[in-house]
C-alpha cells in the first residue's frame, strides 16, 4: 500500500532533525507499489530515504522521496546450522541484530547499533569491529526503475568494498532495493579480533 505526502516536513525523517520539506514523499511496501509509482516513468529527481542517517537536507527537496516501510523478517530455510532469512528494506538494522541475537543466530552481532535500514546496508556495505554486511549477504532484491521489473543480484556481483558497492556507482539512480537475503549461523563464532574488543570481552568474562 502506498501512502503519499505532499509538501511534507522532513524534520522527523532525518537524524539531524533539519526542518526542510519534500515536494512529494511516498511510503511503499513492495515492488508492485514501486511499479505504480513509476508507472509514468521516473521523475526528474527521485531518491530513496530510509532512516535519514548520513544525509543533510540544506534546502527543500523538489523531487520524489521513496521510503520503504515493509518490515518483515522471513526465514527461508536452515541446513547444517546455517539459517537463511529475507529482510525487507524497511527493517531497522539494529532491530534485525536484536532479532538474530535473541534467537541465538550469529554473524551480525558486531554490527549492533548501526543506524539505518536493512535496505541501506548493502549500499554502504556497513561495517564495524572487523565485520561487514558483505560477510552475510547472499542476495539483494531490487526494483529496476527503467524497465519497471524486479531483479536479484548475487553478492558476488555487488562489487562490495570498504563502504562501497555497485549501488553507489553503476546502479545508483537505477534501482530501489526491496529486500536482502542474509545467512546466519547457529554455531557461536564470536569475532573478537578488532582492536580492544577481545581484551574488553575477556574483562567482562567472555562472550555470551
Image (spheres, helix red, strand yellow):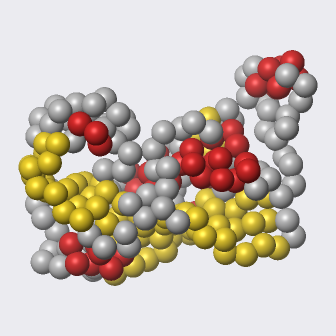
Residue 88 percent location from the top left of the image: 49, 64
- The mark tally for this picture is 0
Residue 145 percent location from the top left of the image: 27, 71
- Indicate whether 145 appears above or below 8: below
Location of residue 130 by image quarter: top right
Instruction: Look at 76% across and 56% down and name the residue there.
Output: 103
As rendered, which of 208 and 148 lies closer to the eye?
208
As rendered, which of 38 and 166 lies closer to the eye?
38
Instruction: Look at 85% across and 34% down and name the residue there.
Output: 207
As rendered, which of 60 and 6 lies closer to the eye?
6
Residue 92 percent location from the top left of the image: 50, 50
Location of residue 182 by image quarter: bottom right
Residue 59 percent location from the top left of the image: 12, 35
As rendered, which of 75 and 183 lies closer to the eye?
75
Instruction: Look at 13% across and 42% down and name the residue there.
Output: 21
Location of the N terminus (image quadrant): bottom left
Residue 170 visible: no
Instruction: Look at 38% across and 38% down and name the residue there.
Output: 53
- Indicate whether 60 appears above or below 137: above
* Left or right of residue 109, residue 1 in this image: left
Location of residue 139 by image quarter: bottom right
Location of the C terminus (image quadrant): top right
- Indicate whether 41 appears above or below 111: below
Residue 102 visible: yes
* Left or right of residue 109, residue 29 in this image: left
Amino acid at each position: 500500500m502506498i501512502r503519499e505526502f505532499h509538501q511534507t516536513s522532513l524534520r522527523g525523517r532525518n537524524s539531524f532533525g533539519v526542518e526542510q520539506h519534500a515536494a512529494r514523499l511516498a511510503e511503499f511496501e513492495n515492488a508492485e507499489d514501486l511499479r505504480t509509482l513509476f508507472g509514468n516513468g521516473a521523475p526528474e529527481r527521485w531518491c530513496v530515504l530510509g532512516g535519514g542517517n548520513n544525509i543533510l537536507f540544506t534546502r527543500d527537496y523538489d523531487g520524489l522521496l521513496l521510503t520503504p516501510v515493509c518490515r518483515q523478517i522471513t526465514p527461508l530455510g536452515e541446513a547444517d546450522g546455517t539459517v537463511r532469512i529475507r529482510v525487507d528494506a524497511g527493517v531497522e538494522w539494529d532491530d534485525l541484530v536484536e532479532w538474530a541475537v535473541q534467537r541465538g543466530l550469529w554473524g551480525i552481532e558486531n554490527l549492533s547499533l548501526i543506524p539505518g535500514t536493512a535496505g541501506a546496508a548493502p549500499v554502504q556495505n556497513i561495517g564495524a569491529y572487523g565485520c561487514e554486511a558483505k560477510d552475510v549477504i547472499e542476495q539483494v532484491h531490487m526494483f529496476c526503475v527503467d524497465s519497471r521489473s524486479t531483479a536479484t543480484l548475487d553478492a558476488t556481483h555487488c562489487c562490495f568494498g570498504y563502504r562501497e558497492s555497485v549501488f553507489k556507482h553503476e546502479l545508483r539512480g537505477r534501482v530501489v532495493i526491496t529486500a536482502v537475503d542474509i545467512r546466519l549461523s547457529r554455531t557461536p563464532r564470536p569475532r573478537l579480533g578488532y582492536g580492544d574488543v577481545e581484551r574488553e570481552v575477556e574483562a567482562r568474562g567472555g562472550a555470551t
